[in-house]
Image: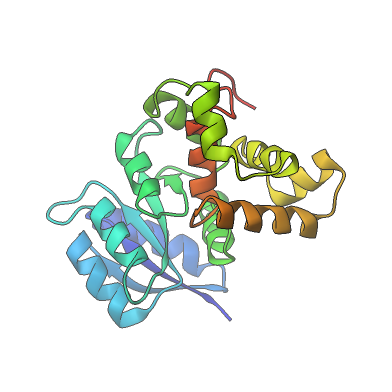
């Protein structure tokens, strides 16, 4: 079964370029396009895509509000935020609105294709070094230990370890290797973390990890 994708960007050339790249794969189908957030809501309602590639800076209804309405609407497609700049405050707002990650518009074709497949499979595009710089720049100072413990108090020690590695950008398979456990065990721990902390997905777990100071924002992995 092919992955159904909707493209949302106010630049026709950008949408055309993405369409050409995605439809070359054979397993990804572009089912609709929109030039602004309002059109995006209509396209999503009509075409029911699995993934939406969403620009944030558009006239009228912007990509952040469109993302929020899609994620909490009747047809909650997964959203990848598109941006020109790796340090963009709108990207963080988009992630908070429920997006599954973000991608630079000048990303390689292989990275675009991979991101769509990963997000369609239920994972998140949240590991690049630009994500770490973005969070470090916009999330503010590290909380005190008491604040951190209050937010993470429901987690076991192993769950804290998993959350820390998730926030550092490691995949489930990489976490499994680091902790000498199976990948299915990592998935179980992550599921419990999301449930205990009332998080929607891996991206929110990454954001929380930074907010709680589990990652040193002054360094890259």
Q: Quadrant of the N terminus?
A: bottom right
Q: Closer to the camera, 210 or 62?
A: 210
On the question of residue 125 being in view, the answer is no
**Among the 4 quarters of the image, the one containing residue 138:** top left
| Residue sticking out furthest to the left | 60
Seen at 52% across and 38% down, the residue is 151
Q: Closer to the camera, 116 or 221?
A: 221
Q: Is residue 24 left or right of residue 73?
A: right
Seen at 25% across and 69% down, the residue is 41
Q: Is residue 210 left or right of residue 170?
A: left
**Among the 4 quarters of the image, the one containing residue 60:** bottom left
Seen at 87% across and 44% down, the residue is 180
On the question of residue 162 being in view, the answer is yes
Seen at 78% across and 60% down, the residue is 184
Residue 164: x and y in percent read 64, 36
Q: How many marks?
A: 0
Q: Is residue 107 left or right of residue 46?
A: right
The image shows residue 20, relative to residue 103, as above or below, that is below
């Amino acid at each position: 079964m092919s992955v159904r994708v909707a493209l949302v960007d106010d630049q026709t050339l950008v949408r055309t370029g993405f369409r050409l790249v995605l439809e070359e794969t054979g397993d990804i189908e572009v089912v609709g396009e929109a030039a602004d957030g309002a059109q995006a809501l209509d396209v999503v309602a009509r075409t029911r895509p699995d993934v939406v590639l969403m620009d944030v800076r558009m006239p009228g209804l912007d990509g952040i509000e469109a993302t929020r309405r899609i994620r909490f609407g009747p047809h909650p497609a997964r959203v990848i935020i598109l941006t020109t700049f790796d340090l963009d405050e709108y990207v963080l707002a988009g992630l908070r609105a429920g997006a599954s990650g973000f991608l630079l518009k000048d990303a390689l074709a292989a990275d675009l294709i991979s991101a769509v497949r990963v997000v369609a499979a239920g994972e998140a595009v949240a590991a690049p070094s630009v994500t770490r710089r973005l969070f470090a720049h916009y999330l503010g100072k590290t909380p005190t230990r008491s604040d951190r413990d209050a937010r993470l108090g429901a987690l076991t020690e192993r769950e804290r370890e998993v959350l820390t590695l998730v926030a550092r950008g490691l995949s489930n398979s990489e976490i499994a290797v680091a902790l000498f456990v199976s990948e299915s065990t990592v998935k179980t721990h992550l599921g419990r973390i999301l449930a205990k902390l009332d998080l929607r997905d891996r991206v929110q777990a990454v954001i929380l990890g930074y907010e709680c100071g589990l990652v040193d924002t002054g360094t890259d992995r």
